[in-house]
Amino acid sequence: MDSELELGNPLRPEELAAQKTAMIGRSVALAFIAVLVTFLSPWPAPLFTYLLLFMFVLLGWCAWFVAKSDWGRPWHQYGFVLADFALLSFTLIYPNPLVPFDYPPQFALRYGSFIYFFVLLAGLAYVYQPRLVLWGGVSGALCWMIGIGWLLNLPDTVFEHPGEINFENAMVLVSRPTFIDLGERAQELAVLLIAAGLLALAVRRSRKIALRQAVLAREKENLQRYFPRKTAQMLAKRSDPFSTPREHNSAVLFADLVAFTTWSEKHTPSETIELLREVHGLLAEIVFRHNGTLDKFIGDGLMATFGTPEPTGQDASNALAAMVEMSEAFTRWKQDGRLSHGMDLRLAVGAHYGPVVVGNIGTRKRLEFAVLGDTVNVASRLEGVTREVGCSCLASAALLEAAEAEQRDDVAGIRTKLISIGPIKLRGRDGELDVYRL
């Protein structure tokens, strides 16, 4: 139930699809019954039956139409269920006025037609709503009791023998067409309510399983917002993939919008959010296309990793290709004229390759997947140095060497776009680092 509250109603599409399937099956079954009635009932009696069957079809499709509409309310479905069982009770008890011979209404109970109540009840199990199933049992019992009550009030109805209860007297009663066996009617109601209760428990169990699957699907979908599809599938299969921190080599990339603060001062909050969504969407798509992991959005920028949570053997090449594509895609995006007032926004990207630690950080109540280490700090510093160097992208020599070692075909072409600017000093870090600019 908690999962259902958190997710709204994740089963609604399935409920509507199941209800539609049930209505199609119901229509086909009623059409088959219409064919049988055509050959088994004397004319013109089938005409009255056709009308009742059409009303069943109409009720079913109206219930589905209301359920899928925006203005439909849950109580509407309870009303349709009550109408269904009321119509069924009328169909089974009220004499067909077009039958070419007379028979007492009480005699309709001899046909054993009460079993149709269970067919109608079973159809309610499709919509994953145990309360609706219970309501169906209560509605059926109530409508049947009203119908039996009407028959009992007929002047010629017999339901008990005035004399001694024995076999001979019982046979005399049964032979009378207006006799109603109250014991049998009580059994029908009891079995109907028991069946409704058992079916509701089964539907409740099925609903829990379906909700659990919906939660798992939502969690897997959320994973795919951060990880490539294959990685998300791998994580979804593991019970605790980050319980023990692990260390391995990965590529880390930082991207940031230069002059965004100045730009946002002259634009409305809605325009600022719209621009961020466009840029974030553009960059995130490139990260995923190159099998990267979107670690986090950082204000107007992002951090992405390649080779987490598992290295692939192509991580440096993927990061290098993503860096180049980000720069080129952002340039095309600007040329499309999406920036107003001619403000010169630039994209700064820094990327590095080296050892990282992958694991969970936080507390038992709040955990977060994190990639830590000096490699992360260097990539972040490189992104910041682009402003001093006057370029859009900086890649460390370690990243380029690792990409060349992976021997991927496209690395040679990317290599021609990079220019060495020699060793540079990064803030807060001893020593110098060889870097390349785009």
Image: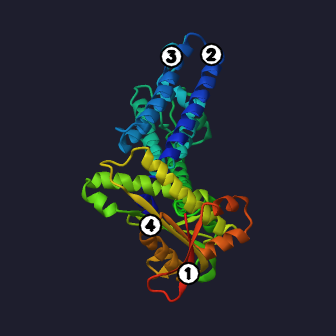
Amino acid type, mark 3: Phe
Q: Which residue is mark 1?
A: 433
Q: Secondary structure at mark 4?
A: loop
Q: Which mark is residue 390?
A: 4
Q: Is 211 drawn above or below residue 123 in the view shown?
A: below
In this view, the residue in front, 44 or 383, is 383
Mark toward the viewer: 3 or 4: 4
Residue 48 disc label: 3
Reading the chain from its start, which is encountered first: label 2 or label 4?
A: 2
Residue ID for mark 2: 38
Q: Quadrant of residue 112?
A: top right
Q: Residues within 10 Å of mark 2 (few under 14, many from 20)?
A: some
Q: Which label's residue is closer to the chain start, 4 or 1?
A: 4
Inter-mark Cα distance, 3 to 4: 87 Å
Residue type for callout 2: Thr
Q: CA distance from mark 2 to mark 3?
A: 11 Å
Upstream in the sequence, badge 2 or badge 3? 2
Query: Can residue 241 be seen from the camera position used here?
Result: no
* Residues at marks 2 and 4, CA–CA distance in whole angstroms: 88 Å
Q: Nearer the viewer, mark 4 or mark 1?
A: 4
Q: Of residues 240 and 19, which is closer to you in this image?
A: 240
Answer with mark 1 or mark 2, whichever residue precedes in sequence.
2
Residue 402: horizontal and vertical position, in percent? 67, 73
Query: Callout 4: 10 Å neighbours few (<14), some, many (20+)?
Result: few
Residue 249 visible from this viewpoint: yes
Task: Give the secondary structure at mark 3.
Answer: helix
Pointer 1 or 3: first along the chain: 3
Mark 3 / mark 4, whichever is N-terminal: 3
